[in-house]
């Protein structure tokens, strides 16, 4: 590993393929860090008493990626020791038990990486234009994140 390989980096990816925790771990692990924290959001099989068959995600990718880059910049200001950040979000169909989103952060110590991961996923859900449709046995519903800033706007 040369010196430039260990410069702080952000890895952002939106795609229709199955997400890999191993791939994300490889992106953020660093010899100068003793902590890698991960958040993995998966599709559950139920919501409000209804059987969920799968989820479908849509995004305006250029805007979503720009918002995720802002989140990474904020993380680096709040937790300067953070080395690498990876955010991957799946688009399209996501079956039950598979990952919809993975966030990984490396830092020298656990507190910064744990806090940064929590900040990343909470802020992503609140600000990034990614839309989720839940498919049930006999119907579907577009879901609005309770956290997103536009959820409180009067309709």
Image (spheres, grey):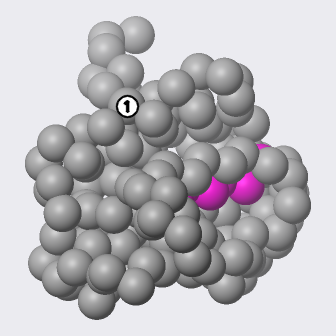
In the rendered structure, which segment of residues is drawn in magenta? Answer: 85-91
Left or right, 113 with respect to 109, comes to right
Viewer-side residue, 109 vs 60: 109
Note whether residue 44 is visible: no
Q: From what the image shows, is residue 75 above or below residue 43?
A: above
The x and y percentages for residue 123 are 32, 44
Task: Looking at the picture, tell me which residue is in the foreground, 154 or 94.
Answer: 94
- Percent across and percent down for residue 127 are 39, 32
Q: Is residue 59 left or right of residue 111?
A: right
Residue neighbourhood size for the residue with mark 1, other residues' Cα within 10 Å, grouped as few (<14), some (14–19), many (≥20): some
Quadrant that contains the N terminus:
bottom right
Q: Nearer the viewer, residue 121 or 144?
A: 121
Where does residue 148 sit, x and y in percent of width and height? Answer: 36, 34
For the C terminus, which image quadrant? top left
The picture quadrant where one finds residue 55 is bottom right
Q: Residue at x 14, y 78 (%)?
A: 111
Location of residue 50 (image quadrant): bottom right
Q: Between residues 83 and 153, which one lies in front from this camera angle?
A: 83
Q: Is residue 85 left or right of residue 137?
A: left
| Residue on which the image places disc 1 | 70
* Residue 143 percent coordinates (x, y): 57, 42
Q: In this rendering, would 140 be left or right of 10?
A: right
Q: Is residue 87 visible?
A: yes
Q: Is residue 58 magenta?
A: no
Q: Main secondary structure of the magenta part?
A: strand
> What is the count of numbered marks?
1
Name which residue lies at 86% across and 61% down. Answer: 17
Q: Residue furthest bottom?
A: 34
Which residue is depicted at the point 59% across and 62% down? Answer: 101
């Amino acid at each position: 590993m040369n010196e430039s390989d260990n410069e702080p980096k952000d890895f952002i990816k939106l795609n229709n393929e199955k997400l890999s925790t191993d791939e994300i771990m490889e992106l953020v692990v660093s010899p100068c860090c003793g902590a890698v924290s991960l958040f993995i959001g998966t599709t559950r099989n139920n919501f409000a008493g209804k059987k969920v068959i799968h989820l479908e995600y849509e995004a305006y990718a250029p805007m979503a990626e720009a918002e995720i880059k802002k989140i990474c910049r904020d993380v680096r200001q709040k937790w300067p020791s953070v080395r690498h950040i990876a955010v991957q979000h799946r688009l399209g169909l996501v079956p039950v038990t598979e990952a919809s989103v993975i966030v990984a952060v490396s830092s020298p110590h656990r507190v910064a990486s744990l806090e940064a991961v929590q900040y990343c996923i909470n802020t992503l859900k609140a600000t990034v234009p990614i839309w989720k449709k839940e498919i049930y046995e006999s119907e579907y519903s577009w879901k609005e994140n309770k956290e997103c800033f536009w959820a409180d706007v009067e309709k």
